Image (tube, grey):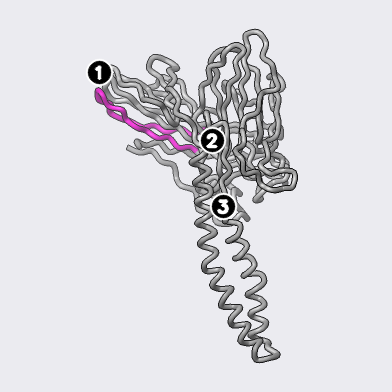
Amino acid sequence: MTARDDLPRPNGFDRGAYSDRGDAYLVPRPLRVGDNEMRVLNERVTAAARPSKSRTDALGLPNRKPMRVVANPDLGPGPGEGVLSIVVDSGATAPVIAVDGVPVALGNGQLDLLLRAGRHTVEVQNTATVDPVVVQIAEGGAHQLQYFEDGVSGHRVLGELPETAEFIPTNAGCWSWFVLTSSVCCLPMSAVMTLMPTETWHWVSGLVLGAVAVALIATGWPMYRRTKAKYHRDIAEQRRALPREPVAYQPDTILLGALPTAVPPLPDGMAAIDLHLECGRHLWAGRRKAAHGSFLSRAWTRPPRVLINGTERPAAWGHWRYLVPTGAYQITVVVDGRAVNLDVPDRHTGSPEKQRDLVIEAHAGQAIPVKAEAHVYAIWRPAKGDIETFEPRLWLETA
């Protein structure tokens, strides 16, 4: 049994995109901003932010040596405190970092944060949501997390990544140079020499030059795309998180995470609902890259509400396991489309929430995979000077 919302109309052009909810893109586009350096948003936390490390040396050449990603924190913990360092690398976007559900920082770089000793939940939201990570802060301890997102491959991960990043060479730039030079220089020159020759050899040379340019473009463009794709695959392979232990929030509620070390076995006579909650975040400023768009990047999407037979369960965006006795169950997921954590005026169009229900039959020893996919929208309207949010979309179905 499947519950689906109507799909939006595909829109292949930026002009008119997100004029209303029906003109939304099927897949959220990354919000690229110029002011994406790490900074603290919450004045009530004790934190320090620093920019990302550069791979280029003083001469502007790439450093081919392995680079340590996480620097030593500048903050010293007090009694009953520990330090959590979070490194964010997401290209030209500006993800939002939240701890225990409260947004604390925004952007790329390293955040050093003082936290009380104990268990804390770290979340990051950007173009889409990722599974939260639960960190046990020890008194006087230093803990590290990293968030990495590659806009080309779509790889995004939050967790314990390798502390050093190896240099990954690529010759994609050479192939792009061949294509660009052939298109901008060789083809026009070939056309001039062939169509307006002053000597016979001009005509022959123009044909030869045109043939060489076409051959370079025909060879170079596929090679450029192939080498670029391989480069981003290699980066994604290098920047992968280590598996983590599932975390029990209640005796019958477990946060599995994106990559659990081992899924706990089901108790005798029990079943499980494995619910994957994910959200695509359409943050749109009306252009390919906004020089000052972090006012929109800071938008935070509320966690979904999950009810099983009318009883609300703990939930956040990510992979969850709910233990249930055998029998029939109605799963209800509610998503709020109104953004929070904004510092500019905002307004909402349509219903603020979207609810979907799904009925399943659970048998002993069975884990039923269910997926809930939501899409939320926050669009900058420069003519009115505010941010407009739309009614969210939500799909709920067995995986």
Question: Which mark sits nearer the N-terminus, 2 or 3?
Answer: 3
Q: Which residue is mark 1?
A: 269
Q: Which residue is mark 3?
A: 170
Question: Which of the two marks, 1 or 2, is nearer to us in this view?
Answer: 1
The residue labelled by disc 2 is: 351
Asked which secondary structure carries label 3, the reply is: loop
At 25% from the left edge and 25% from the top edge, which residue is drawn? 363
Q: Are marks 1 and 2 in contact (CB under 8 Å)?
A: no
Question: What residue sits 59% from the left and 51% below the top?
Answer: 17
The quadrant of the picture occupied by the C terminus is top left
Look at label 3 and name its amino acid. Thr
Residue at the limit of the structure toward the right, as seen here: 58
Residue 230 percent coordinates (x, y): 50, 51
Judge whether residue 353 is colored magenta: yes
Left or right of 394? Residue 346 is right
Q: Is the residue marked by circle 2 packed among few (<14), some (14-19), or many (20+) residues within 10 Å? A: few
Q: Position of residue 213 (x, y in %)?
A: 59, 73
Q: Is residue 119 magenta?
A: no
The alpha-carbon separation of the residues under discs 1 and 3 comes to: 54 Å
Q: Nearer the viewer, mark 2 or mark 3?
A: 3
Q: Is residue 333 something one can see in this rendering?
A: no
Three-letter code, disc 2: Ser
Work out whether residue 62 or residue 341 is closer to the camera in this orientation and state it. Answer: 62
Q: Secondary structure at mark 2?
A: loop
Q: Kindly identify which numbered label has been placed on residue 112.
A: none
C-alpha distance separating marks 1 and 2:
41 Å
Over which residues does the magenta segment extend?
348-374
| Quarter of the rendering containing residue 191 | bottom right
Is residue 322 positioned above or below 181 on the image? above
Q: Residues within 10 Å of mark 1 (few under 14, many from 20)?
A: few
